[in-house]
Image (spheres, rainbow, N blue to C red):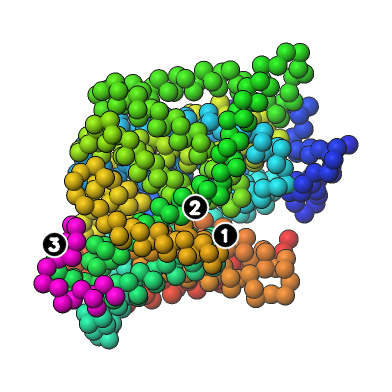
Amino acid sequence: MEHQVSQGKGLPDNAYKELNSGEQYHPILGPSRTPPEVTPYSVIIGLIMAVVFSAAAAYSGLKIGQVFEAAIPIAILAVGISTLARRPDAIGQNVIIQSIGASSGVIVAGAIFTIPALYILDLPASFYQVFCASALGGFLGILFLIPFRKYFVKDMHGKFPFPEATATTEILVAGEKGGSQALVLVVSGLIGGIFDFLFSAFGLWAEVITSRMVHVGEVLADKLKIIVRFNVSAMIFGLGYIIGLRYAAIIVAGSMLSWYVLVPLFYSVGQGLALPLGGTATKTIAAMTAEEIFRNYVRQIGIGGIAMAGIIGIIRSSKIIAGAFSLAYREIVHHKGNGEASPLRTQMDIKMLFVAGLILLTALLIFLFFYAGVVFNITHALVGLAIVLIIAFLFTTVAANATAIVGTNPVSGMTLMTLILSSFILVQVGLTGTSGMVSALIIGGVVCTALSVAGGFVTDLKIGYWVGTTPRKQESWKFLGVLLSAATVGGVILILNQTFGFKGENALAAPQANAMAAVIQPLMSNTPAPWTLYLVGAVIALILLLVKIPPLAFALGMYIPQELNLPLLVGGLVAWWVTSRSKDEKVNNARFSRGTLIASGFIAGGSLFGVIAAFLRFGGLDLAIPGWAETPGAELVGLVAFVLLFAYMITDSMRAKVE
């Protein structure tokens, strides 16, 4: 018998529980049904979502180093649109919309971690290279994950929490609630978007407020190199709410170590030096601001911490990596089996032989791309192809496992390792200098995108499993979402580079790409790398591991600029506040859910309006008040505006009621 759908959840009672012996999970759309899934409506809406959220996610990722997850906002909008359009039996179509549209965030994550480093290092880069690296990497991520769908999605039912998939599924299932949820998202999106647009396009207030706005802060910054920097963006504030207090506090702790311990320490020790200290610095430490000390020295320690955190993550997932080959072999044997009963509709994948053929075709296209568009040498192209296939396959299960457990994918750490390995191997085969850096970054881009897509796609497939859609349809149409997202991201990166740039004053932060550039340049040239600083960061990551503090979050806090970290803590504090004011847990949960919608709206709206501001500036339309945004008065106005935004979020979140 099928489990009854519970009134509170809308899903069977055993949806989130481990199954007993002989027990089965029966999805909402049973295998005997043939619900509408792939329709012109679902495909067109999904593709529109892919384009819009690719542009928004690319802007947010390059600005603050965090790519917001598109799955939840897309699911809310899909449910809201289908409700307003009064489409019957829409849940299967909404899953397809979400699956196609969610290609945006994962493709963006793969591209922005590596491709902007080409511009940062003044290397040749084209739309063709960005598009091919993103699209071919995305195809590999889909194809390498398909053999493991059954293991992660069905066999491990109830053993992995799948936090993002859970939230998205609940939104899709709660059909009638989805309409009102979409309204909250739209309103908060407009508020957050207009808020960010007022300073990004019109410059009505300063985007970053600092302790220099008061005399005491100016003295501390000059004499002790101690400064507080805070970005008032609604987008970053919303991201902090979704991250939550625990991880936001860990990230900010890393930032505090960098800015309030290491920066003053470098200044104290080096202020008496008559020459610049080390590598690329052109000023003495005594002549540097706190920001310059951070950029030239302290962030290198953060890079070392990020790299070591990635190694730690891979070691922890060694059992899954070791079992990857055997799992793939069993899947191939399974699909070749003769006389086996046809699988249920809800368990039908693309046939494994077809998957193997597509992997070979993708490998051929990657080889041709490397040979004709990157290295122009058969040996080097073959070496690059081998690096991509081996690393992407081994790390696919790591990405899927991490996403299934914590909802986040440590792709930046794995990509950093890929760049180091690629650079070492390419140097051994004679590919160095400018061509070597371009090759390593393109290879890293393909691998990074493959791992990002694999981690995101396992979420899509789990959503489909809970609802009862056809995996083969999700797998097939995901390729189209990846293709369109890759084209969109390529165009947006080119526009943002020409509008803002990725280096120098007022450039987009692009923190991960800057980290990749900082690592690869000394590896591919004769410039001495700051290995001692990398080693210090690695040791800090190991110490954090011993005291059971997540090293990757802490190391990212050490590396990402302070003004992008402190707002995360404020958002995390709001999340804690709204979930701890009532003794009724249901009330707290309702408030948290409403706050999540508001935060998602801030992120989506801020990102989208940020893209609009970028297009205006790209078109030569500068609406900002000349010079005002750099004054203490503009910083004070920014502080007041943020306090009002803060008050709105708390007040509106507390309005939530238990239904």
Question: Which residue is the site of mark 2?
Answer: 312
Q: Quadrant of the C terminus?
A: bottom right
Q: Is residue 49 visible?
A: no
Q: Earlier in the sequence, mark 1 or mark 2?
A: 2
Query: What amino acid is at disc 3?
Result: Thr
Q: Which residue is at 58% across, 53% downward?
A: 406
Is 388 within the magenta? no
Mark 2 or mark 3, which is nearer to you? 2
Q: Which residues are magenta?
A: 265-281
Q: Is residue 273 magenta?
A: yes
Q: Which mark is residue 282?
A: 3
Q: What residue would you read off at disc 1?
A: 596
Q: Give the image location of residue 197, x and y in percent.
A: 35, 59
Q: Are marks 2 and 3 in contact (CB under 8 Å)?
A: no
Give the image quarter of residue 598. Answer: bottom right
56 relative position to 464: left or right: left
The residue at 40%/52% (across/down) is: 307
> Which type of secondary structure does the marked residue at label 1 adopt?
helix
